[in-house]
Image: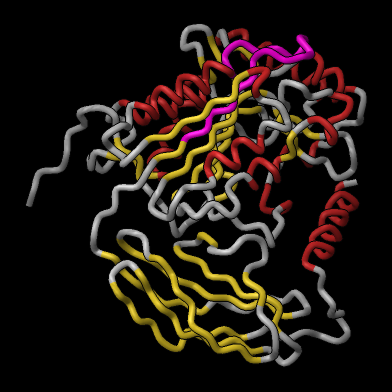
Amino acid sequence: ELIHHLELHVQKRLQRSAPKYSADAGFEAPKARILDLRQEGKSARLSVELNDSRGLKAMQVFVNGVPLYPESGKPVKGRVAKFEESVELGAGRNKIEISAVNDSGVESLRATVPAHYDKTVQGDLYFVGIGVSKFRDQKLNLRYADKDAVDLERLMQRYQGRYARVHTLTLLNDQATRASFERVREFIKPAGIDDTVIVFVSGHGTYDLTTEATYYYITYDTEVGRLAETAVPYAKLEGLLAGVRARKKLLLLDTCESGELGPERVREIRALADKKGLDMRTSAVLVQREAMARPRPFLYAKDRYLYNDLNRRTGAIVFSSSEGGELSFEHPSIQNGFFTEAVITALTSAEADRDKNGSVSMAELEAFVRGRVAVSTANLQHPTIDRDNIEQDFNLPLLCSAPRKPER
């Protein structure tokens, strides 16, 4: 069953890439070269050469791991292409990469050149909070998922003055429908390269019962028996950040990632949670639904890299509240999910700021949140980075009077 599941995803990936080569015929990757870079202030002009013996299809430009063009990139024709490409630089270090894709769907190694822009740029902050506690199907109701989104929005509004402008949008309960996700896309669309975009999602998550086992976020109007038609697939959640020009992008998911634990395992977890006074962020409706099918333990080893559409690159960091085979928890004492509470604490106390520079890097955020949630839930829940852009470890300012390192 696992092999069949993986085979389906391999075939889907090949269909998306549309390769025209066969194993017998072999293949040759195209070549990309950066011949020259001329920098004028915030703009870098690249002289680029691409070539492929069979014919070029597209090219892509990456700056600090974030693609400039949506999907597979900018169309290119012919076997050899020479042209100039203009790239807007962000403040500080810029790692510029160029790659080419040929007609067979094969991508070149990336040609790389560094650039640096010395001036500090104060960008805008865009925050979207989506939280559903009250569903059309009331058996799915939660307690604090909507409050999670409200509390994080209030936190982000405190960044007024730390960013040029702060833009926020929350979709709560009946506002958070499958159709409303287009509002999110339009809201963050104006973000520029020096801006920061954070999308936060809280509520239920589950896998469908098909062989492909697609992961879905359950919106207000979701019908559990019709996930494909009424819920939001993970690819669409991450896809919200595709094509957004901002190079600092973070997707936070305070949803269960539990695969199919089955009623017996859920009872075990509930017993452990009850001893610690923890409330599970799940529903009897979902547990009963999963019990209808034979459990698929391989979903516990959640690895979304396996399911990635390699043509859909966002450059975003994806941070979720639990590992595979785990539930997420909340509690009246904090009136939040433990993941959300840890994120808020990280940005409002000096604890997460290990280097005492007055801000929290993505690496510091991950370390603090993962440790705090594990302790708070007696090791029943472990947040995890699902997709990491190692080229873009940006910082979020601390909202407290954190001590700074002394000047040298």
**Is residue 162 found left or right of 80 in the rendered image?**
left
Q: Magenta includes 199?
A: no
Instruction: Give the residue displayed 70% in from the left and 88% down from the top.
Output: 78
Q: Position of residue 248 (x, y in %)?
A: 44, 50
Up/down of 355 relative to 333, above or below: below
Instruction: Indicate how the structure is coloured in the image.
Output: secondary structure
Q: Which residues are magenta?
A: 127-145
Up/down of 45 relative to 226, above or below: below
**Is residue 193 found left or right of 12 in the rendered image?**
left
Q: Position of residue 242 (x, y in %)?
A: 60, 52
Instruction: Give the residue displayed 54% in from the left and 62% down from the top.
Output: 67
Viewer-proximal residue, 362 or 155?
155
Q: Position of residue 130 (x, y in %)?
A: 59, 27
Q: Magenta includes 133?
A: yes
**Is residue 110 found left or right of 283 in the rendered image?**
left
Viewer-proximal residue, 233 or 179?
179
Instruction: Give the residue displayed 45% in from the left and 59% down from the top.
Output: 391
